[in-house]
């Protein structure tokens, strides 16, 4: 398949990316088409849709072998489920599917048309294979069952960011960062309250600890990609 575009997001690594699209609406990204596909006619009519589907590649999870079962983070990483009953990146074909909100089609920038989206769960530079409009009459099923994903109670962390660290966060990124941290970005199998985690986000390296359901930011430094 041909790569038609790549996304520009605030996540230079996999760590901290929401486990599903739409979970953190404040997250924004820009879908930049490859030169061959930078054609205004190709997005004609897309402005009338509020949401779009992205078909993309788990580019950091490509493997030659696959396993019929995986450990979903939703179940704490302790129970195995069939790979086709999950959205795990470790699949026979490393294909991802995300529904995101289309905020704007930027036709004026040098790389235009560029799609500005929110709620994306993709790492910066993720290859995109296709874009399709979300059609409510066909794609929305309120009566659908959510399987094991609905049987596990969702827990959110309380996020505390001391003022000296909050002052270092760009104002337009603060709420998105809080939303990401609230979802508990730690791997399911790591719950050490003494450990300090570092999460790259929007050019920052955000350091935090989690104890008794409270996530406390304890430092912010410039992110340096080695």
Image (cartoon, rainbow, N blue to C red):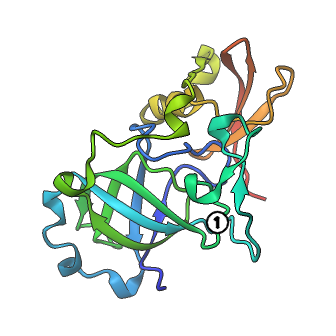
Q: Quadrant of residue 166?
A: top right
Residue at 45% from the left image edge and 29% from the top image edge: 175
Height in image: 9 above or below 55? above
**Residue 98 % position (x, y):** 43, 56
Q: Secondary structure at mark 1?
A: loop
**Can see residue 14?**
no
Please tell me which residue is depicted at 30% across the width and 71% down the height of the picture. 112
Residue 137 seen in the figure? yes
Q: Is residue 191 left or right of residue 156?
A: right
* Position of residue 195 in the picture relative to residue 160 (left or right): right
- Considering depth in this image, is 215 or 174 the residue closer to the camera? 215
Q: Which residue is mark 1?
A: 91
Crowd tier of the residue under label 1, counting other residues whose Cα lies within 10 Å: few below 14, some 14–19, many 20 or above: many
Q: How many marks?
A: 1
Does 121 sit left or right of 199 as displayed?
left
Identified at 72% across, 46% down, the residue is 80
59 to 149, vertically: above or below: below
């Amino acid at each position: 398949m041909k790569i038609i575009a790549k996304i520009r997001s605030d996540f230079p690594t996999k760590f901290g990316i929401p486990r599903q699209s739409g979970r953190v609406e404040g997250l924004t990204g820009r879908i930049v088409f490859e030169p061959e596909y930078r054609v205004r006619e190709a997005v004609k009519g897309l402005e009338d849709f509020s949401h779009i589907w992205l078909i993309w590649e788990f580019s950091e999870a490509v493997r030659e072998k696959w396993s019929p079962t995986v450990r979903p983070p939703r179940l704490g990483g302790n129970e195995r489920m069939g790979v086709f009953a999950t959205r795990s990146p470790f699949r026979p074909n490393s294909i991802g599917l995300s529904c995101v909100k289309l905020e704007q089609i930027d036709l004026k920038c040098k790389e235009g048309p560029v799609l500005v989206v929110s709620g994306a769960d993709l790492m910066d530079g993720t290859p995109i294979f296709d874009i399709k409009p979300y059609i409510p009459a066909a794609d929305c099923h309120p009566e659908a069952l959510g399987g094991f994903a609905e049987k596990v109670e969702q827990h959110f962390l309380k996020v505390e960011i001391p003022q000296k660290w909050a002052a270092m966060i760009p104002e337009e990124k603060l709420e998105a960062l809080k939303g990401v941290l609230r979802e508990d970005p730690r791997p399911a199998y790591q719950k050490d309250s003494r450990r300090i985690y570092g999460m790259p986000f929007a050019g920052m390296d955000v350091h935090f600890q989690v104890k008794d359901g409270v996530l406390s930011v304890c430092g912010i430094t410039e992110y340096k990609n080695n």
